[in-house]
């Protein structure tokens, strides 16, 4: 059982705004300020994960916990994989690979463990969790991925006039594989807890 199943207690010091959005590479907090640092589906976007991990460690009290999650490989996240494969057929010479490269590109548990240990963390626990992603229609995940992520930019750079056609094709691929009504498919992530 992961330590995430325990309740973490703690509070933000009075002089910090609860809603600030700090830079993960340069956290604006004193050393040993927090018992818990959380990051939900963000670590794969850090431009320098080693620096971000060192910053998380720096602001944690000794024995504090760094809790974060990341998406597993794209093949374990079915709708994202369906969309990526569909777009490869529309743009065969230069397929848009944002989903595979970035949100689903940082999943190697050995690498993750090593980067956390190099940053000074100990007792790194990684648990893989699979769930079902559900949508009321095949179009919803197609729109979410093709128009609601940076994948949209990659489609438009290749051919700005093909965004709707690409979205429609991705929806048809999802419908062919999962049905035309409500759809559900596997979604998988790693949950990581590391001790400072």
Image: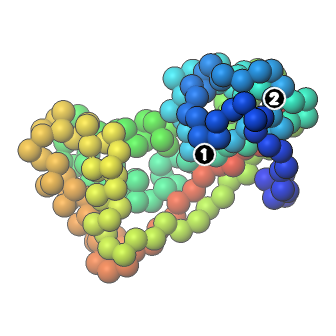
> Is residue 190 at all visible to an observer of this figure?
yes
Q: Secondary structure at mark 2?
A: loop
Lateral position of residue 136 relative to residue 152, left or right: right
Image quadrant containing the C terminus: top right
Quarter of the view holding residue 48: top right
Q: Is residue 195 above or below residue 55?
A: below
Q: For the residue carrying disc 1, how many other residues have a C-alpha within 10 Å: few (<14), some (14-19), or many (20+)?
A: few
Quick one: which residue is furthest to the bottom in this view? 181
Q: Residue furthest left?
A: 161
| Circle 1 SS class | strand
In the rendered image, residue 18, in percent from the top left (x then y), is placed at 65, 40
Q: Nearer the viewer, residue 55 or 155?
A: 55
Which colour style is shown?
rainbow
Instruction: Find the distance from the CA under tag 2 to the CA under tag 1.
Output: 20 Å
Q: Residue at x 83, y 44 (%)?
A: 10
Q: Please give the residue where the numbered disc 1 appears in the rendered image.
A: 40
Circles 2 and 1, Cβ within 8 Å, touching? The answer is no
Across and down, in percent, residue 27 comes to 65, 23
Q: Judge from the rendering whether residue 159 lies leftward or rightward of residue 62; answer left or right.
A: left
The residue beneath circle 2 is 33
Q: Residues within 10 Å of mark 2 (few under 14, many from 20)?
A: some
- Left or right, 146 with respect to 48, comes to left
Q: Position of residue 119 (x, y in %)?
A: 76, 21
Residue 110 can be seen, yes or no: no
Which dot, 2 or 1, sits closer to the camera?
2
The image shows residue 179 at horizontal and vertical percentages of 33, 77
């Amino acid at each position: 059982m992961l330590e995430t199943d325990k309740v973490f207690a703690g509070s933000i010091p009075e002089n910090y705004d609860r809603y600030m959005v700090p830079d993960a590479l340069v956290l604006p907090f004193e050393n040993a300020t927090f018992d818990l640092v959380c990051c939900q589906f963000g670590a794969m976007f850090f431009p320098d994960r080693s620096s971000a991990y060192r910053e998380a460690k720096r602001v944690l009290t000794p024995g504090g916990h760094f809790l974060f999650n990341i998406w597993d490989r794209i093949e374990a996240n079915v709708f994202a994989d369906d969309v990526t494969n569909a777009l490869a057929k529309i743009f065969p010479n230069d397929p848009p690979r944002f989903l595979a490269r970035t949100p689903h590109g940082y999943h190697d548990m050995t690498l993750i463990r090593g980067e956390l240990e190099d940053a000074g963390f100990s007792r790194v626990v990684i648990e893989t969790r699979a769930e079902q992603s559900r949508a009321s229609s095949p179009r919803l995940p197609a729109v979410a991925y093709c128009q609601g992520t940076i994948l949209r930019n990659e489609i438009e750079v290749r051919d700005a006039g093909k965004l709707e056609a690409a979205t429609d094709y991705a929806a048809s691929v999802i419908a062919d594989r999962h049905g035309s009504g409500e759809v559900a498919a596997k979604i998988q992530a790693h949950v990581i807890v590391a001790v400072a």
